[in-house]
Amino acid sequence: MLFECFQLKNSQGLIKICPFFNLSCCFQLKNSFGFIKNIIFFQSFTLFSLNLPMLKQILNKLPKKPIKSESLEDPSITKPNPPKRSSSAVFPSSILTGIEPLIPFKDAPISEQMSLFISKLSLCCMVFDFSDPSKNPEEKQLKRLTLLELLDFITSGQAPKFSEPAIFALCKMCSVNLYRIFPPNYRNNRCSRGKNKGEKQENEVDEPSFDPAWPHLRIVYDVLLEFVASSSVEPKVAKKYINHSFILQLLDLFESEDPRERGCLKAIMHRIYGKFMVHRPFIRKSISNVFYRFVFESERHNGIAELLEIFGSVITGFSLPLKEEHRIFLWRVLIPLHKPKCLGVYFQQLCYCVSQFFEKDPKLASMVIRGLLKYWPITNSQKEVMFLGEIEEILEAISMVEFQRIMVPLFWRIGCCINSSHFQVAERALLLWNNDQIYNLIGHNREVILPIIFPALEMNMQNHWNQSVLNLTHSVRNVMTEMDNMLFLACFARFLEEREKESFETEKRKEAWARLENAASLQPVSWNTTAVLIKGRRDSTYETRKNEATD
């Protein structure tokens, strides 16, 4: 709360100032021009004693009654024009009287605007409960107007250089209004929904819950965004208050379910990263830690897509050659982000970040493909389709040397996808042959690739249930025949030979089992055999006991 209560002790002629809450108390005095002269801050829970003459002098300078809003006045009653006041944000008689507006910036001289700016920021540190619209409606509206006035003052471009106390006051105002802890049920977010509920699909996203205070929070976010982007803010001074703690608390707010709030946070983090170069390594490390916790611990976070968008622009600015730190980020952070089940929520942003890396350094393409093969989904068909799409994008930009390093494991996996019983996976794998760049890569390395792919194509032609997959398989088979007919015939002959060997081994195995069953059937059953479990100290063994049959 911004307002304190005063108690007079008449017996000793002293005044004792007893703040109710742990915030600052602000005295505002008027000079001869009617504007704020001094602002003196006193810490909470501290007692100050003033003599009686000084008390009378201060009380004579305070307004006798609080100024009411113009909307509450009766227009039929005419009142004489009161003398102009320096500020209405002076001490009210009690907390229940509410807060009052300060004078506009246009009515204050330039020398007093920064002090007025700090006063308005202090006024906006009042926090209200927006879940109940009936509580403090006038005060909420008054605070909203004050925030809009602060926003206009910052964006007007007429503001002088922001002083260190002004920067501190704005950071404090933003911290009081924005930084909050989300309740536990707030964290049952879109990346974890469906994980423990069989009736929901893995990538299904419920409607986000919106904060009722958002119209108010949006203005605070706009104030912070314009303040960080303002040329009147010196980074050397502001970095003391927009520090590591401030940044970490901003990153915590990315867990909000409200996409509008995450969008504002993304824009602010972009500005902070661009303006405060000293904080760039810390921001990258902190975002990486968020990704680590998401992938390897909780798999619960709402702002992964927005954080990846921030990193997408950061990766664009990386200089060449890439530092080892950036390569480690690709291998240990971006590649493992393909593992969670909710990949579809942020897949587009993740693909963009990965593509930025191998566009800067084409040698990283083979490393990316090896990472994708490491985390390839086996039972999730939707993720397989996404992986195949990303593989196609990488193969469009890969060099021949890098392609030859990974073509054997890659096309073995593609062959498994061609044989998939899920028709979308099989279709997506077969459609790779429609890409001219991939077709050229396969053509130059057909002696290695065709023997790997041919069995999958033949098995599809014989066994697959989907007609569309059969048509695509037949088309790819014709393409490979036109590419190298002799090699195709050799692969076909080898395939028939291997099938004959498999049939022979199958028959041999069946005969062996038949002999065993026949031998077992010829043995007379004269003993009752029971298995008794005997538990030892370190292991358990089975002892077979034979008991003589009784009549």
Image (cartoon, rainbow, N blue to C red):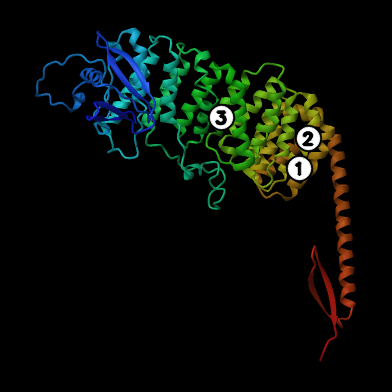
Give the residue at x 27% y 32%: 95
In the image, is residue 449 above or below residue 268?
below
Give the residue at x 41% y 17%: 166
Q: Is residue 233 left or right of residue 316?
A: left
Q: Which residue is mark 1?
A: 457
* Quadrant including the C terminus: bottom right
Real-space Cα separation, disc 3 to disc 2, in angstroms: 43 Å
Which label is found at residue 307? 3
Q: Secondary structure at mark 3?
A: helix
Q: Which residue is mark 2?
A: 480
Give the residue at x 65% y 34%: 389
Residue 331 pos. (x, y %): 70, 31
Could you classify mark 1 by the number of other residues whose Cα lies within 10 Å: few (under 14), some (14-19), or many (20 or more)?
Answer: many
Tell me which amino acid carries mark 2: Met
Q: Quadrant of residue 9?
A: top left
Q: Is residue 515 left or right of residue 2?
A: right
Q: Secondary structure at mark 1?
A: helix
Real-space Cα separation, disc 2 to disc 1, in angstroms: 10 Å
